[in-house]
Image: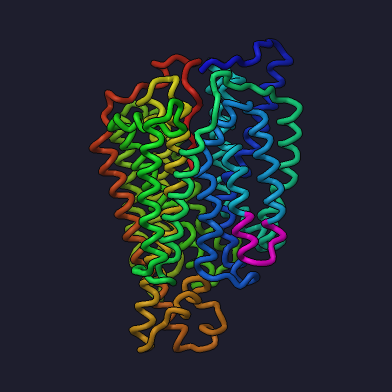
Amino acid sequence: MAETAPASAGAPAARRSWWTLVAVCGASFMLLVDVTIVQVALPSVQRELSGSFSDLEWVISAYALTLAALILSSGSLADRFGRQRIFAAGIVIFTVFSLVCGLSTTSTMLIAARAAQGVGGAAMFATSLALIGQEYRGEDRFKALAFWSATIGGAVSAGPLLGGVLTGWLGWRWIFFINLPIGVVTLLLALTRIPNVHDPEAKRLDVSGLVTFSLALFFLIFALIRGDEEGWASAQVLGSFAGAAILLGVFAYAEHHQARPMFDLSLFRKPAFSGVNIATFAIGAGMFAMFLYITLYLQTVLGYSPLQGGLRVLPITSFAFIVPLVSRRFTERMAPGVVLGSAMLLVAAGLSLMHGLTTTSDWTSLLPGMIVGGIGIGLANPAIARIALGVVPPQRSGMASGINNTFRIAGLATGVALLGAIFQQVIAASLTTSLGRPAGALAQVVASTGTQSPAVANNPAVTAIARRAFLLGLNDIFIVGAFIALAGAVAAFSLIRGRDVVRAAQRGPGTAEPAAVAMGG
């Protein structure tokens, strides 16, 4: 890439680099903590805004959808107009719409604001690693990356607990208001401490790729979320699925004929690159999407407060954070495909262990699965970053990282919608069988509020039926999630070969772009 980073040296440059790292870490903390912090608060959001089950799904999916759809386009804009400008614009958008989220008075307003948050998040996400890359070289770059990675792991790990504290003590709106001071400080640093570096060869944005990919992802998520309410054979749902398929085909055609595509499909000619991205999508769809439904179980069926519920999911996030730190020397000596495949098997095993909940189960029934799944996530994340960057030439590592992050976030959005469709369908079938009449409306209530809704809680007979239906749905999606993770394991074992992955040390310390982000630790 024909770009020129500032060449200044000495103490002023070192101070500038430090402030760049602080700004990048602050922005990264905001955008990734919002993936997990919101899930803990959703039952409280539902109660106050009277949202439906599909509204809860959209609060997660709207953010993930725009984030996934715009990561690569934001990177292209940064190449053309400068990383600092796009980074700062992202901070402004994210911070302003965090305020709008906190002030939302309806579910529709909150969902729209969350989608706008994702636009800002994509701009920050796409530029964060590049900003570190332009300011640091050699060993200093790896130290900066370690600091940034610790921030990412801490953000995702702290999200459930922080969400529980804020929601329990101050109310759910404060999970968004907390972004305001962080955003203001980060913006000031970006505007005063970070130089604006761009790529003089970047001429135009890949508009056709942006539009077709974004719309295809939207239609897919829309169809999955609306399927239960509208009917899977309805014209709206079938048309949305067809639209997603057609647009993905148009997207592939457009990218193949682009001189500078935002999504270079030629990278997928390497089996290892395909394998790592399938596994990345699988861990997002199979495990990270499950956090929403675990949170609903803890708060709306077992009756824990947001703080108590947040504390009880810490085994997953804590192990996801700790395992990479203690296993690094061991896993680096193993074939990366074996590490990732084994990690995905652990994730599948963790989800399987959470299956089997009964009406007498407590949260401790989830604990073995949480621990095993957390260890799997902790092993998978570093392996994903290593493989995604190790199978492409150094000059393509920025593109590879962007594609991998897109698969991760798209997996989360798709998983929330897919698991939600199955979850609600099983609940509706169980309620219909038990009550002897169609229970579509009640299924929506049970899926979103468990046994906490007055319509359920005030009738002991309905409460027992609703609890059993909720658990049937949850048990089923644990198995579905396990199969998704298992598919990721198969892809890793079969497609990723050790000789395809080049170690970072072989690239030279100044050549590779920073590693791909690892949600969950």
Q: Residue at x 51, y 71 (%)?
A: 448
Q: From the viewer's perspective, tell me whether residue 428 is left or right of residue 454.
A: left
Q: Residue at x 61, y 41 (%)?
A: 29
* 48 up-or-down from 378: above or below: below
Q: From the viewer's perspective, tell me whether residue 477 is left or right of residue 199.
A: left
* 340 up-or-down from 41: above or below: above
Judge whether residue 82 can be spotted in this image.
yes
In this rendering, the count of numbered labels is 0
Quadrant of the rendered image containing residue 259: top left
Indicate how the structure is coloured in the image.
rainbow
Residue 401 highlighted magenta (yes or no): no
* 357 up-or-down from 207: above or below: below
* 253 up-or-down from 329: above or below: below
Q: Position of residue 199 (x, y in %)?
A: 57, 20
Q: Nearer the viewer, residue 116 or 385?
A: 116
Q: Nearer the viewer, residue 318 or 306?
A: 306
Taking the view exactly as shown, the residue that stands out farthest to the left is 494
Which stretch appears magenta? 101-113
Task: Name the dominant secondary structure of the magenta segment.
Answer: helix
Q: Position of residue 96 (x, y in %)?
A: 71, 48
Q: Position of residue 250 (x, y in %)?
A: 38, 43
Judge whether residue 474 can be spotted in this image.
no
Q: Position of residue 208 (x, y in %)?
A: 47, 39
Residue 111 highlighted magenta (yes or no): yes
Quadrant of the rendered image containing residue 464: bottom left
Q: Residue at x 39, y 54 (%)?
A: 243
